[in-house]
């Protein structure tokens, strides 16, 4: 890494950390634990981490093991609590450090694709991106997942250029823990395999060897948790059993007809079929019943699905207006909307110019496509979108370049 890149990395890390730590001090009591800012997510993540640290197992109630929450983020909290007790100030410092690392990874990913100046802008966008700053003030799994995704994508891009098994191994390990943190990351495995097959298409031996390394390593990290779930519940649960509540909560009459929830999500406790869910004997059966109800609703409303999918797409790319916190909504509008506009403009530029139709750029587009697919299946969560911070910021830089070049052409018609 050149001296200039090292200096940029250091500056980005320090500034990103200070911005995030200032946000924690301003917006939250650093000695207080999680709130319901993201529903029950943060509270349950914290409780699970604390119980694991105490040696009580992965459970929210005594002697009731659970698989409702993916384990990646709670296990990070468990490590902190095991070493330092339930030390909330330390947790927020760790969140800020992770946020700073995410900004550095954004710069490193961009450095693989564009020049150092543009890459520095991508890192700078990540530093000020309001959603990323806000995440460190709450117990959001994005704090960990964005780092996993960033490291995974950066190492994979380097592998595509160098063919190094070491870089592919780093990508696979990051992907595996990313799946344990946010299970939707499992969709990235076939995407990366397709890119790998294309890169190694001239050598079947190398193709199979590297594909095996990627798939085996990533899934090997997930396998112990899957085995644990089978031993506990006697069912095949790869990571978590909350997919049914997410699916049914994002596919029902309310999110189709109620303007407040268009393309969004609503707790299944507020849906009329809830008694059927409550009648189930355990959380795995709950999940199964919610899948049955959700799939049944989709089949009955097949003609309405294009409209619902449109709602989901719109919600995915809008600021998070659903929040009851008006200050948070204002922050989203000011600190997210301009960068998202640049991101969409950048994606369009990359798709419309053949010079960007390389395996590296198409892989980055694929990361966004997998997120869009997740939103269409479940719901248009801005959190799904923002979990792709490093990739979003890179496309934002391309969008900025497109905007500036258009202005330059307008002012200089002869160009």
Image (spheres, rainbow, N blue to C red):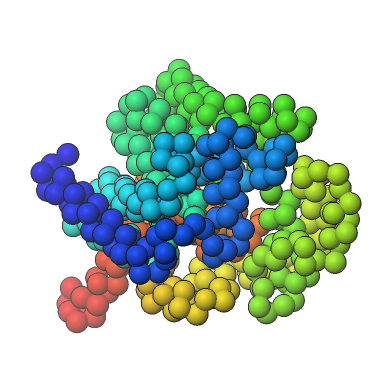
x and y percentages locating residue 144 in the rendered image: 44, 47
Asked whether 358 or 166 is in front, the reply is 166
**Residue most toward the left?**
3
- 168 up-or-down from 375: above or below: above
| Location of residue 171 with respect to 304 vertically, above or below | above
Report the front residue among 401 and 203: 401
168 vs 239, left or right, is left
State the image coordinates of residue 241 (x, y, percent, origin top left).
70, 44
Residue at image x 46%, y 36%?
A: 82
Left or right: 405 in relation to 272? left
Which image quarter: residue 330?
bottom left
- Which of the 4 image quarters holds residue 262? bottom right
Position of 98 relative to 405 (above/below): above
Which residue extends farthest top? 205
* Residue at position x 10%, y 44% in the image: 3
Front position in the image: 17 or 30? 30
Residue 38 visible within the image:
yes
Apparent side of residue 333 relative to residue 189 in the rendered image (left or right): left
Q: Quadrant of residue 30?
A: bottom left
Q: Nearer the viewer, residue 172 or 58?
A: 58
Q: Quadrant of the C terminus?
A: bottom left
Q: Quadrant of the N terminus?
A: top left
Image location of residue 21, percent across then percent down: 32, 60
Q: Residue at x 69, y 32 (%)?
A: 229
Question: What residue do we see at 42% from left, 66% from top?
Answer: 28
Q: Is residue 183 visible?
A: no
């Amino acid at each position: 890494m050149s001296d200039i890149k090292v200096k940029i990395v250091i500056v980005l890390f320090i500034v990103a950390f200070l911005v995030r730590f200032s946000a924690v001090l301003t917006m939250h009591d650093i000695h207080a634990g999680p709130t319901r800012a993201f529903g029950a997510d943060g509270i349950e993540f914290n409780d699970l981490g604390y119980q694991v640290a105490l040696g009580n197992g992965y459970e929210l109630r005594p002697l009731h093991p659970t698989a409702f929450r993916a384990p990646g983020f709670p296990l990070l909290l468990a490590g902190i609590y095991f070493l330092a007790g339930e030390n909330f100030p330390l947790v927020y410092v760790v969140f800020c450090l992770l946020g700073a690392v995410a900004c550095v990874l954004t710069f490193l990913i961009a450095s693989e694709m564009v020049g150092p100046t543009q890459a520095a802008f991508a890192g700078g966008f990540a530093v000020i991106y309001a959603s990323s700053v806000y995440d460190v003030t709450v117990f959001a799994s994005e704090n960990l997942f964005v780092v996993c995704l960033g490291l995974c994508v950066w190492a994979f891009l380097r592998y595509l250029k160098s063919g190094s098994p070491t870089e592919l191994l780093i990508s696979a390990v990051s992907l595996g823990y990313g799946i344990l943190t946010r299970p939707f990351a499992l969709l990235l495995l076939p995407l990366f395999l397709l890119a790998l097959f294309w890169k190694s298409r001239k050598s079947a031996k190398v193709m199979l060897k590297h594909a095996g390394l990627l798939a085996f390593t990533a899934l090997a990290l997930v396998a112990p948790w899957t085995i644990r779930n089978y031993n506990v519940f006697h069912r095949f649960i790869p990571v978590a059993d909350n997919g049914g509540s997410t699916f049914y909560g994002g596919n029902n009459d309310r999110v189709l007809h109620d303007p407040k929830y268009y393309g969004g999500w609503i707790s299944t406790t507020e849906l009329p079929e809830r008694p059927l869910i409550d009648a189930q004997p355990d959380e795995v059966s709950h999940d199964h019943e919610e899948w049955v109800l959700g799939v049944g609703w989709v089949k009955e409303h097949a003609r309405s699905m294009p409209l619902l999918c449109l709602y989901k797409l719109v919600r995915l790319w809008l600021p998070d207006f659903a929040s009851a916190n008006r200050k948070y909504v204002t922050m989203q509008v000011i600190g997210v909307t301009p960068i998202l506009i640049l991101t969409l403009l950048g994606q369009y530029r990359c798709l419309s110019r053949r010079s960007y139709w390389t395996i590296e750029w198409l892989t980055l587009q694929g990361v966004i496509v997998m997120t869009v697919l997740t939103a269409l299946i479940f719901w248009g969560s801005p959190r799904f979108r923002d979990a792709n911070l490093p990739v979003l910021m890179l496309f934002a830089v391309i969008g900025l370049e497109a905007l500036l070049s258009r202005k330059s052409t307008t002012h200089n018609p002869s160009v």
